[in-house]
Image: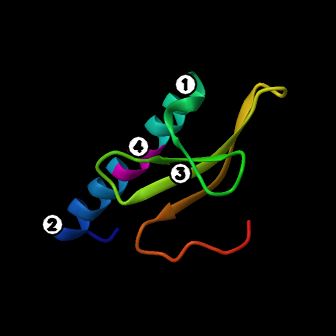
Amino acid sequence: MMKLSSSQKMRKILLYLVVQRIKDSIDLLSENPSLGHPRRIPGTHELIVPNTRYIIHYRVRPRLKRIEILRIFHTSRKQPNRW
């Protein structure tokens, strides 16, 4: 088994924290769908994941009683023109 260097261990920990923050944000959305900000595309919202460079794009489907996660973007990436 290969041993991880200190920097690899730190990277793994940081990755875990980012994933956990994204999951926590999605959990908050399920409790409060209006938490995010409306987007230019009608019916869609975005939520900035705290202490990360990620944004969750979603829409609320009240009739179906659910939230649909459309995409999760890193802010350094160009957002698509089409959904």
Residue 23 image point, x, y percent: 48, 40
Distance in Å between CA atoms under marks 1 and 3:
14 Å
Distance in Å between CA atoms under marks 4 and 2:
21 Å
Sequence-wise first label, 4 or 1:
4
Crowdedness near tag 2: few (<14), some (14–19) or many (≥20) residues, C-alpha within 10 Å: few
Queried whether the magenta region covers residue 39, the answer comes back as no
Distance in Å between CA atoms under marks 4 and 3:
14 Å
- Of tags 2 and 1, the one toward the viewer is 1
Distance in Å between CA atoms under marks 2 and 3:
31 Å
Task: Report the side of 47 relative to 7 (left or right).
Answer: right
- Residue at mark 1: 32
- Of tags 2 and 3, the one toward the viewer is 3
> 26 or 2, which is in the foreground?
26
In the image, residue 51 sits, relative to residue 64, either above or below, namely below
In this rendering, does residue 5 appear at all? no
Crowdedness near tag 3: few (<14), some (14–19) or many (≥20) residues, C-alpha within 10 Å: many
Residue 67 image point, x, y percent: 69, 36
Instruction: Tell me which residue sits at (50%, 33%) in the image.
Output: 35
Magenta stretch: give its range.
18-22
- Residue at mark 4: 20
Task: Report the side of 43 relative to 24 (left or right).
Answer: right
User: Disc 2 residue type?
Assistant: Ser
In the rendered structure, find residue 56 and report the number of the disc placed on it: 3
Q: Are marks 2 and 1 in contact (CB under 8 Å)?
A: no
Quarter of the image that includes the N terminus: bottom left
Q: Are marks 4 and 1 in contact (CB under 8 Å)?
A: no
- Residue at mark 2: 6
User: Disc 1 residue type?
Assistant: Asn
User: Disc 4 residue type?
Assistant: Gln
Quarter of the image that includes the C terminus: bottom right
In this rendering, does residue 16 appear at all? yes
Secondary structure of the residue carrying numbered label 2? helix
